[in-house]
Amino acid sequence: MKFNTKTIHGGQQNIDPAYNSVMPPIYQTTTFAQSTPHGHKGFDYARSGNPTRSALEQSLASIENGNYGIAFGSGLAAIDAVLKLLKPGDEVISTSDLYGGSYRLFTSIFEKFGIKFHFVGMDNVAHIEKHINENTKLVWTETPTNPMMNIIDIEETAIITKKHNLLLAVDNTFATAYLQTPLDLGADIVMHSATKYLGGHSDVIMGSLVVNNKDLADQLFFIQNASGAVPGPQDCFLVLRGIKTLHVRIQRHCENGKAVAHYLKSNPNVDQVYWPGFEDHPNHDIATKQMKDYGGMVSFTTKKGTLESAFKIVENLKVFTLAESLGGVESLAGHPASMTHASIPKKDREKTGIVDSLIRLSVGIEDVEDLIDDLKQALN
Ligand code: P1T
């Protein structure tokens, strides 16, 4: 099956043996009757498993070209489950440019439990190897990164992690499986904030992991049940519905993202524009190699370079909504330094380029002329 067909049919065979409904029923139940207390086959308690969740998990596995999909109550809950594979004393090498909430989870929660994190600029993968020692267990990447749109070479990173017998996890939230499939490039775990493009309509918080290896899947399913951060069946239904239009939505996000990025570059009040489709983007060639297109996320700084100049723009936008999050059909604008990345200390934030005048756009699928007109008036 090719990708677009998989978004609709992948893993969806025999989803309703009772009535053959085309979409899976929403099994709104906490528990399932058992015929015997021992040796029961099938679903029992709904934290451990639910048929609507299973239908979604099979869809997730199918679109990411993996064997096992595992759904969680949020993207952070999915990342939390990956870190629970580790034990005190273990070390993680993470990209230094990543979602602020991932950074906060690493430093405010897991450091307390004795896990050590090294934050490294991974736009050059040679930087990774310098931090590997006998305690290193996991390399955590995000590509394109949030919000600087840096591109990390997944294939080259996987060569390093395989050589040193480390797990490689890729946060694929910005690209989605439509643009890149990290497992095919050698990653062990692909993670999503399904809240974003997979759900696609800004109406559900969810996270997911997809893996190929059975032992790893068993450990993660164990953590999913034992820690209990599972999504409800209504939310699973919504994400499953979102995935069915993922390919058409992402195509339009990419078209509109490209037009907005080029418009911003031509605006005299804009300084830098961060979008991997530009030929002068530092890792444009890697983006072209590993992605089908360049995505709908664009960040930029103002010529004035001040916090006030960025605030004025995001407050004046009318079609773009000033809000956290991304990946929905509607365009959103955010100010990373005071919103999504406020939990990263200012000096660390600025090292990666998250300066006070940086604005991040999640370009939606409205008519692009309306988006550009809106930016034109707000940037005036
Ligand atoms: O919000 P949640 O579903 O828990 O996902 C966390 C997360 C993980 N990884 C990436 C790359 C993300 O962008 C996010 C969430 N990001 C936002 C809310 C945001 O506006 O950037």
Image (cartoon, rainbow, N blue to C red):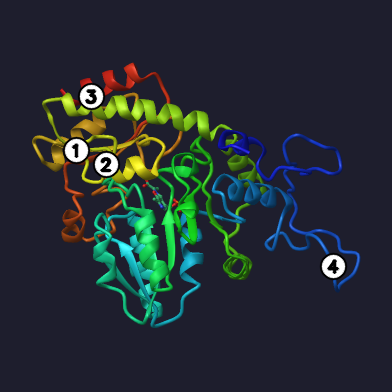
Does dot 1 land on a helix, a strand or a loop?
Answer: loop
Q: Of all residues shown, which one is farthest toward the left?
A: 304
Name the amino acid type tagged 4: His
The location of residue 223, given as percent across then percent down, is: 58, 69
Mark 3 crowd level (few <14, some 14–19, many ≥20, 10 Å Cα): some
Name the amino acid type tagged 2: His
Residue designated by label 4: 40
321 and 80: which is toward the camera: 80
Residue designated by label 2: 284
Q: CA distance from mark 1 to mark 2?
A: 7 Å
Q: Nearer the viewer, mark 2 or mark 4?
A: 2
Q: CA distance from mark 3 to mark 2?
A: 19 Å
**Rendered view: 369 above or below 154:** above
Q: CA distance from mark 1 to mark 3?
A: 16 Å
The answer to which of marks 3 and 4 sits earlier in the sequence is 4
Residue in view at x 83 percent, y 64 percent: 41
Left or right: residue 236 compared with residue 310: right
